[in-house]
Amino acid sequence: MKYWNIIFCILGILPLGFVIPILLFYFHAGQLLGRLPRYNQPDPKELDIYSDYSPLVDLTGKIWLISFPVWLILTITYLIFRRKHIQWTPIAISGALQLLGLIILLSGIFQWYID
């Protein structure tokens, strides 16, 4: 049981590795522009800070996109094998953080970033 909690903790932290850098870049760009950026206004690659943030956002985004299906598969496996002794807290926390990553991925912030 202890191993499941560790796995869900790790898989819950990985989306934060993507969410935090992209939000920092977005709000840093907004601070420099005096307004929050929107799709193609300006192109993120035109900003001087893009080269500082893009390697981190790209790397953590790829790691998170790999961890999301792994989280889904392990959650289903856990629910099947431990159906009588399920601890919902680790699943709920890691699921909420995975959902946060999905929300950012589908938001205008990520659309602006990949512009």
Image: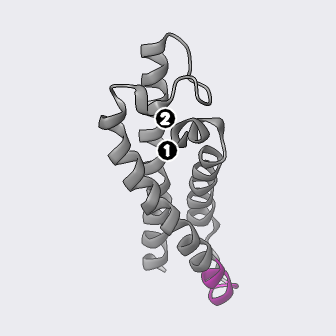
The residue that label 1 is drawn on is 19
**How many residues crowd mark 1 within 10 Å: few (<14), some (14–19), many (20+)?**
many
Quadrant for the C terminus in the image: top right
> Residue 19 at x, y = what percent?
49, 44
Quarter holding residue 54 = top left
Q: Is residue 89 magenta?
A: no
Q: Could you say whether the residue bearing mark 2 is in a helix, strand or loop? A: helix
The residue that label 2 is drawn on is 23
Residue closer to the observer: 45 or 31: 45
Kindly identify the residue that appears in the image at 63 percent across and 52 percent down.
102
Q: Are marks 1 and 2 in contact (CB under 8 Å)?
A: yes
Quarter holding residue 49 = top left
Kindly identify the residue that appears in the image at 60 percent across and 66 percent down.
91
> Residue 107 at x, y = what percent?
65, 41
Q: Is residue 52 above or below residue 31?
A: below
Q: Is residue 102 above or below residue 52?
A: below
Q: Could you say whether the residue bearing mark 1 is in a helix, strand or loop? A: helix
* Three-letter residue code for mark 1: Val
Residue closer to the observer: 6 or 95: 95
Q: Main structural element of the magenta stretch: helix, strand or loop?
A: helix
**Which range is magenta?**
76-84
* Three-letter residue code for mark 2: Leu
Kindly identify the residue that appears in the image at 56 percent across and 20 percent down.
36
Q: Is residue 79 magenta?
A: yes
> Residue 63 at x, y = what percent?
43, 62
